[in-house]
Amino acid sequence: MIFGDPRHVDGESFQKGTDVNGGEGLFPRLPSESLEKFSPILGSWCDNGDPFCASGNDVSVHLGYIQEYQDDMTQFVLGLIGN
């Protein structure tokens, strides 16, 4: 799991959160650095307004992933281990 990834690139299949079709991170991944091969086991949460992953300007968005998505993250992990 990744939260507020500064390497975020718009359109990756493993994106979660509210910025699934928006800005890119401060240091977007190059095509040669793609994580798509890990998409079955990877979740990357990025929300609108996050200055690190979504070209936003609200640091509180970046600091709030655990509180905002703790239930979703738990379900994601449980789904990976088959529970």
Image (cartoon, grey):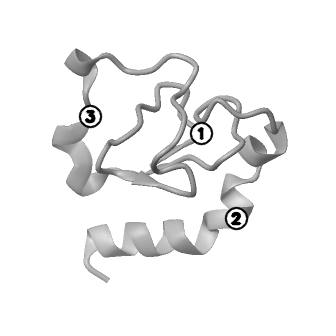
| First in sequence: mark 3 vs mark 1 | 1
Q: Earlier along the polypeptide chain: callout 2 or callout 3?
A: 3
The mark nearer the N terminus, 1 or 2, is 1
- Most foreground residue, 34 or 80: 34
Between marks 1 and 2, how big is the CA–CA gap? Answer: 12 Å
Could you say where residue 10 lies in the image, as x and y percent from the top left?
A: 41, 37
Toward the front, the furthest residue is 22
Residue 42, position as x, y percentages in the image: 33, 50
Q: Are marks 3 and 1 in contact (CB under 8 Å)?
A: no
The answer to whether 17 is drawn above or below residue 62 in the figure is: below
Instruction: Tell me the CA gap for discs 3 and 1.
Output: 15 Å
Q: Residue at x 37, y 21 (%)?
A: 29
The number of discs equals: 3
Secondary structure under the numbered disc 2 in the rendered image: helix
Q: Is residue 2 left or right of residue 18?
A: left
Q: Are marks 1 and 2 in contact (CB under 8 Å)?
A: no
Residue drawn at (45%, 75%), measured in percent from left and top?
75
Secondary structure found at label 3: loop
Is 43 situated above or below 62?
below
Q: Quadrant of residue 23?
A: top right
Pointer 2 local density, CA inside 10 Å: few below 14, some 14–19, many at least 20: few
Disc 3 residue crowd, few under 14, some 14–19, many 20+, Cα 10 Å: few
Residue located beneath label 1 in the image:
4
Q: Residue furthest bottom?
A: 83
Q: Which residue is mark 2?
A: 68
Which amino acid type corresponds to the residue marked 1 in the rendered image? Gly
- Vertical relation: 58 (above or below) 29: below
Relative to 5, 66 lies left or right: right
Amino acid at circle 3:
Leu
Residue with the mark numbered 3: 35
The part of the image, by quadrant, that contains residue 9 is top left
Q: Is residue 43 visible?
A: no
